[in-house]
Amino acid sequence: MAALLDGALGWTPCLRRNRSSTPCAPSEGPKVKVIHTLTSMGCPVGPMIQENIDQIARSMPEVEDVEVELTWDPPWSPEKMSDDAKFILGFG
């Protein structure tokens, strides 16, 4: 799923099945729940990101139902960025 999002959004978000470090993937039948966060509560592209996650997940042939949940726990920090994202944004 991360590869699909990378191509569609231009970056690879950090997707989780739960609050552990397990990547999100279709696991229990055709329903997928994506829990995501934003860099800030006032993120101007937050609604677009949420809609894109939903649309891209639904485009996968094995997915029939998608739940997209925004969370602030744990809060976002630059340490959560992928190495590619850090490089692109100049975070070393």
Image (cartoon, rainbow, N blue to C red):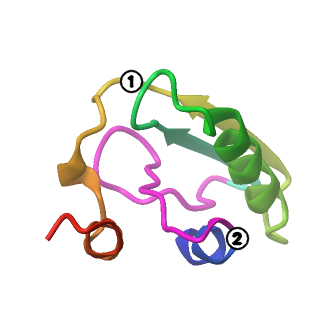
Q: What percent of the width, then of the height, locates residue 3?
A: 57, 78
Tag 1 secondary structure:
loop
User: Mark 2, residues whose alpha carbon is within 10 Å: few (<14), some, or many (≥20)?
Assistant: few
Q: Is residue 78 left or right of residue 71?
A: left
Reading the image, the residue beneath label 1 is 72
Q: What percent of the width, then of the height, locates residue 74?
A: 28, 29
Q: Is residue 46 left or right of residue 54?
A: left
Residue 88 shows up from this direction: yes
Q: Residue at x 74, y 52 (%)?
A: 52
Which part of the image, by quadrant, shows the N terminus?
Answer: bottom right
Label 2 vs label 1, nearer the camera: 2
Count every numbered label the image shows and give the total.
2
Residue 19 counted in the magenta span: yes
Q: What percent of the width, then of the height, locates residue 41?
A: 46, 21
What amino acid type is highlighted by mark number 2? Ala
Reading the image, the residue beneath label 2 is 8
Residues drawn in magenta: 9-28
